[in-house]
Image (cartoon, grey):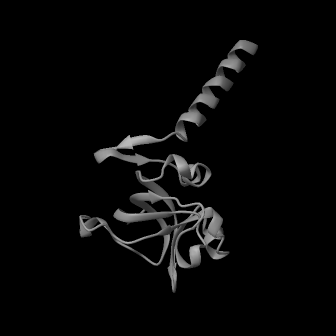
Amino acid sequence: MHRLLRLLCLMLLFSAATSLADSLIAEGVISTPLIRLLAHPEEYEGKHVEVIGYYHSEFEERSLYLTKDDATNLNTQNGLWIGSIAKEADKNKVHFIKKGFVRVAGTFSYRPTRGAGHMGLWPAELKDITFFATTR
């Protein structure tokens, strides 16, 4: 019985670990959880990534957060600045909205001494956006 329980625990741990891992998707884009970008930004510098998060846009703010509460409370350390659309982007695949959960693909930029976005308040930025759509 203890062996079976141990085996089930190991399977559960393995499953949880792999669900948070990066995966390579079409055209060399790395799909990763937003929390990994925030926790290990130096590993993603200059890479094309796709993430899901809560998007919030208003005057002097276009950013992606871990949660809606982070956006409401302007917790910029739990978010990324969203930059401009890539010149080569298919405009039919970029649909900016005001707020809500979205899937975004772009180039990750991390400059620890400078910050990103309005007044450098965000720790990093997704720029040259190639895909932006609501998640449903």
Task: Examine the rendered structure and indicate whether residue 102 appears above or below residue 19.
Answer: below
**Is 127 on the left-hand or right-hand side of 100?**
left
Q: Residue at x 39, y 58 (%)?
A: 105
Residue at (66%, 70%) from the top-left corner? 75
Residue 11 in view = yes
Q: Where in the figure is residue 93, as x and y percent of width and height?
A: 29, 65
Residue that protrudes farthest toward the right in the picture: 2
> Which quarter of the rendering shows the N terminus?
top right
Q: Residue at x 47, y 52 (%)?
A: 45
Residue that sits furthest to the front in the current view: 113
Horizontal relation, residue 21 to residue 85: left or right? right
Report x, y in % for residue 96. Answer: 38, 74
Q: How many marks?
A: 0
Instruction: Say which of 14 and 113 sits in front.
Output: 113
**What percent of the width, then of the height, locates residue 104?**
41, 61
In the rendered structure, the answer to whether residue 76 lies left or right of residue 50 reads right
Q: Quadrant of the C terminus?
A: bottom left
Residue 29 percent coordinates (x, y): 36, 48
In front: 24, or 43? 43
Above or below 93: residue 9: above
Q: In which quarter of the image is residue 122?
A: bottom right
**Residue plotted at (58% across, 78% down):** 119
